[in-house]
Image (cartoon, grey):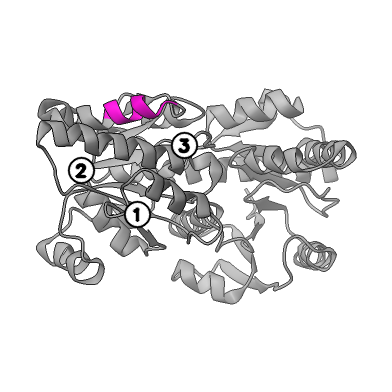
């Protein structure tokens, strides 16, 4: 089969979540595919973050933001000039495409659509819905990161299921570099003054992440542990974006009386985050909504027990390796944390199951399926251009 020219929109590579996805997909494509031609459309500085790529990868500089008319026009012009067979857009976007080649789109979740829709009046909400539906209907293929997300797309936008393919996310390979060493533990002791047992949350800090209830559950847990005379110096460490847009969290900490036991560390690079995952007693992730939910898998790869929600995609992702809770019930979260802290046989079972569950998700397996889809779409498109019937 002739080599395929594939463009990938990398302009959102520094976004939380989408950025991790783009980096890992491109890195894995670079390792697996030395035949097809790839054009990475976006900032050359962002491409450098991916690392060395083979000669069949080229950077196409495009600095205009994604959500502007100029950015759209330049993007479209690049695809025409390069005569691309298809383009992979790695995130949901609502602007109708009218692109000069077929596009595949990755949908991580429906959260942006739903949250924006709630903030708008009837006309704009309907317009946004129809534009999103149109762009999804125009995609040659939709990659959903979980069955939950695929079902959401089908239910909300009436897209036929055969047009949607589930291709799972996987964890970044840097989380697979073994357990924390004495030098690693010394690093977090010196740099962050962490010398005590702790529970860990890592991820964005936004309302749907349910961090307020997690803090309330931790406060109740401290009271329970005091009765047990156990873990008197236990802390809760929260790693994520800065708190400036979330004053509710500080107020919750003070109201719950745990201001000396909850620490907000802001953004931490992966090389250091992996040490925190490794050292945590429990990873807590009581999110109300996830299209996939990578952090629980990242913790499992380090053998850390996970307490997470029984809603959205999370049961699908963690399988039988985590303790699942109703994320709207503070005392259910607290009881699960208490049980996992105190029950050593349970902790051991969760550690072993966690390793097994994390190993089920692989960028190599996911990207190999993407490659097959790229080839199928390019083949269909070429047949259509040549006026030949497309085989079912």
Q: Could you give the CA–CA distance between mark 1 and mark 2, rounded to whole angstroms?
A: 22 Å
Q: Could you give the CA–CA distance between mark 3 and mark 1, rounded to whole angstroms?
A: 24 Å
Q: Could you give the CA–CA distance between mark 2 and mark 3, rounded to whole angstroms?
A: 19 Å
The numbered mark at residue 173 is 1
345 shown above or below 219: above
Q: What stretch is highlighted in magenta?
A: 329-336
Main SS type for the magenta part? Answer: helix
Q: Nearer the viewer, residue 339 or 186?
A: 339
| Callout 1: SS | helix
Q: Which of 143 and 5 is in front in this view?
A: 143
Asked if the residues shown at circle 2 and circle 3 are in contact, with their CB atoms under 8 angstroms apart, the answer is no
* Crowding at mark 3 (Cα within 10 Å: few <14, some 14-19, many 20+): many
Q: Mark 3 points at which residue?
A: 287
* Crowding at mark 2 (Cα within 10 Å: few <14, some 14-19, many 20+): many
The numbered mark at residue 281 is 2
| Callout 3: SS | loop
């Amino acid at each position: 089969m002739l080599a395929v020219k594939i463009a990938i929109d990398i302009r959102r590579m520094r976004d939380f979540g989408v950025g991790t996805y783009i980096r890992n997909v491109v890195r894995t494509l670079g390792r697996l595919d030395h035949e097809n031609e790839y054009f990475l459309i976006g900032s050359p500085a962002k491409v450098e973050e991916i690392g060395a790529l083979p000669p069949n990868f080229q950077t196409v500089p495009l600095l205009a933001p994604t959500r502007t008319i100029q950015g759209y026009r330049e993007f479209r012009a690049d695809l025409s000039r390069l005569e691309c067979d298809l383009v992979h857009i790695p995130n949901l976007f609502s602007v109708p495409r009218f692109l000069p080649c077929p596009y595949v789109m990755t949908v991580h979740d429906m959260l942006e659509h739903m949250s924006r829709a709630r903030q708008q009046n009837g006309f704009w909400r309907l317009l946004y819905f129809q534009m999103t539906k149109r762009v999804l209907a125009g995609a040659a293929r939709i990659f959903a990161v979980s069955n939950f997300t695929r079902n959401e797309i089908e239910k909300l936008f009436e897209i036929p299921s055969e047009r949607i393919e589930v291709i799972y996310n996987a964890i970044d390979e840097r989380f697979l570099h073994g357990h924390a060493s004495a030098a690693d533990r010394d690093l977090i002791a010196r740099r962050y003054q962490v010398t005590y047992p702790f529970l860990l949350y890592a991820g964005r800090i936004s309302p749907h992440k349910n961090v307020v209830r997690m803090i309330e559950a931790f406060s109740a847990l401290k009271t329970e542990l005091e009765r047990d005379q156990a873990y008197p110096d236990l802390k809760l460490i929260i790693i994520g974006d800065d708190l400036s847009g979330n004053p509710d969290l500080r107020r919750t900490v003070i109201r719950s009386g745990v201001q000396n036991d909850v620490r907000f560390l802001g953004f931490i690079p992966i090389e250091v985050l992996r040490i925190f995952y490794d050292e945590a007693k429990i990873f807590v992730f009581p999110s109300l909504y996830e299209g996939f939910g990578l952090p629980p898998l990242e913790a499992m790869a380090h053998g850390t027990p996970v307490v997470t929600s029984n809603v959205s995609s999370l049961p699908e992702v963690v399988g039988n390796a985590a303790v699942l809770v109703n994320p709207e019930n503070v005392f259910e979260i607290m009881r699960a944390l208490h049980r996992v802290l105190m029950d050593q046989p349970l902790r051991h079972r969760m550690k072993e199951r966690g390793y097994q569950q994390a190993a089920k998700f692989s960028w190599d397996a996911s990207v190999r399926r993407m490659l097959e889809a790229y080839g199928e779409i390019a083949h269909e498109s070429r047949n259509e251009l040549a006026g030949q019937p497309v085989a079912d």
